Image: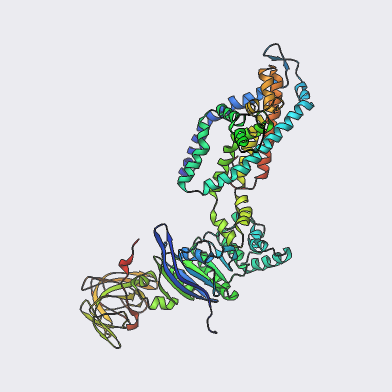
Amino acid sequence: MPKPRMDARPQASREAWAFPMLLYAALFVGLSLLYILGLSFMSRGTGYTAGLPLGGHNYARIASPLYLRSLLLSLRLAFFTALFCLLLGYPFAYFMARASARARTWLMLLLIVPFWTNALIRIYGWKILLSASGPINQALLTAGLIERPLRLLYTDFAVQVGMVYAMIPFMVLPVYSAVERMDWAMVEASRDLGATPLRAFLTVTLPMTLPGILAGLVLTFIPSIGLFFLSDLLGGSNTMLWGNMVHNELLKSRDLPFAAALSVVLLSLTGLVILLYRRMGGKAEGMVF
Amino acid sequence: MADPQVLLSLRGLKKTFDTQEALAGLDLDVYAGEFITLLGPSGCGKTTTLRIIAGLELPTQGSVFLDGEDITYLAPEKRAVNTVFQNYALFPHMNVYKNIAYGLSLKGVGRQEIARRVGEMLELVQLSGYEKRLPSQLSGGQRQRVAIARSLILSPRVLLLDEPLGALDLQLRRAMQHELKDMQQQLGITFIYITHDQEEALTMSDRIALMREGRFVQLDTPRGLYEQPRTAFAASFIGETNLINARAEAVKEDGVLLDIAGFHVPCASEDWLTPGEPLLLSLRAQRLHLSREPVSTPCRLSGTLVESHYAGGERASLVRLDDGQVLHTRASTEGEDLPEIGSQVYVWWQQESGVLVRDDREDVHA
């Protein structure tokens, strides 16, 4: 029976090839996660250590108004980041996918080139743009629209702008790939059956690119909860996001177990979002993960 | 039948993509209730023509009239014309019911009315009970029926079908050909049908518009196209034919006398004929008879039998004429006993089986 053997061989070798990857994941992802989970039930030791007693006290501490407020703020910010990324990114991705090959290359470059620069430096760029004497305020003053410079920097608004800016490629790319894969005969069929261009978009294009939209929402929402340097640089002193909390506990308070507990909460939220995504897109084709 | 009424007209339709000329000026009148087929090789412009009628493409020049009204620049959603797309273009995120109901729900038709008419359509295409299935859960033939139902539910004045059977296997294709034709006659809807399959065109159509390089080569009934092809392209695209080089010796009132490899062969004349000009005589392989003995009819040639093999109901043979030209014949195997390979044979035919055609074989620019 030569046939099963021929099938079995590449199968076995494929698994063999996957083994280093699995080992890598087990070591660096699995073990680390277990370590953090364990750590979150420990108590703070002297200096930068953790020790006994074990217990749920770190989680009890999280269930306080201070942390819940930060959690809500983070979720709200992440939600609006994902939403604005969708509203701005979808049209961009749509026109990029439908543009000529030449224009497409240029648009793709516009999207990718900023990524060749360090993210921190780009955020400093926003600091200059949004500052009291920055170009935006200058332009508004010159135009006579305002009398005194607006306070743009060190506000929740600045953090929101920075986040949308940082995250938008993660919306554009999955939506682009979904629009690019669209069979436009479907849209023609819907026009042929009596749909105006808008109705055709709403009833055919939008549902057919839904997997891309969902992937984009997840890819922009999840990192937005955890980003901390953006609010450090652009936000006011009371813009304490979940990422800032973890950052502070880890590097300033040096409370490793508590930082671990905060991280576990963040990870659980992330898992929940992905679960939701899978539930929503369960039947759709072309799901990303 | 009463005087046929023109439903759809194309006038001087031209289409250029970049610098590529896809349509070179088409004129066509389609009658109400007619089944008309645009037939031609791929790239001949038949799909472009259909897309212009549907409103999915604008012509560079010319007009489309429906019921005497100029609809050239009317948006596709405003035309009483629907299309069955190649590969069906069913909405993958909607089930069969929603696909078929789509057009009506856009029009704001009430829920109960939609349910009733979708039910009717499902019955017509024999898919009752499949309402909840997604297109991905259907076979090719079933998808095809859904696509037809989805268009027919809007009762279009004209239904455009772009190679609707192209993706089906041969057996299913045959069955669907009959179903489609029955449906068309039953509903009395005008069909404009695209195919590159000449057999499909011959069996289904009332008229065939044979296309080549953005032009209509011949617009005729299936029988007319087969029996009276006007050009070498038409003759060889439909069925199997021999195109024999001939010279007109004398043009008379009742026909023309041809010189073919030294034989004097009479044939019906054509109005474009000029004496002395080299000509092509189209002879259908099925209409040629073989004989060992000399025959009395003047419509005959002689040559050497070079090949002959049994092919079921007929025998496919090759005869080389004395001037080197080769004739294919597909004579019935009934009765006759066969000449040996290499022997002298006579090929003969009924005079009306020989048709003079214009030589357009060199006209291909592409």
Rendered image quadrant of residue B116: bottom right
**In the rendered image of this protein, does residue A52 appear above or below residue B53?**
above
Q: Position of residue A57 (x, y in %)?
A: 77, 21
Can you give x and y, in whole percent of width and height, for residue B310 in the image?
35, 70
Q: Is residue A210 left or right of residue A3?
A: right
Q: Is residue B254 left or right of residue A283?
A: left
Screen quadrant of the C terminus of chain B: bottom left
Any part of residue B258 in sight: yes
In this rendered view, identify the residue nearer to me: A136 or B205. A136
Farthest residue toward the top? A46
Q: Nearer the viewer, residue A95 or B39?
A: A95
Figure check: A240 above or below B61: above
Residue found 59% across the figure and 42% down from its top? A89
Please name whichever residue, A84 or B172, is drawn nearer the observer in this view of the structure: A84
Identify the image quadrant of the N terminus of chain B. Answer: bottom right
Q: Is residue A113 above or below residue B221?
A: above
In the rendered view, tell whether residue A280 sits above or below residue B134. Answer: above
Visible residue check, residue B171: no
- Tell me the residue at 68%/66% (across/down): B119
User: How many numbered callouts?
Assistant: 0
Indicate left or right for B88 with B317 as reference. Answer: right
Image location of residue A222, percent across then percent down: 65, 34
Which residue is situated farthest in the bottom direction here?
A: B253
State left or right for residue A151 relative to residue B212.
right
Residue B217: quarter of image = bottom left
Q: Nearer the viewer, residue A13 or B36?
A: B36
Query: Which of the colour schemes (rainbow, by chain, secondary structure, one colour) is used?
Result: rainbow
Give residue B322's position: percent from left, percent from top.
21, 73
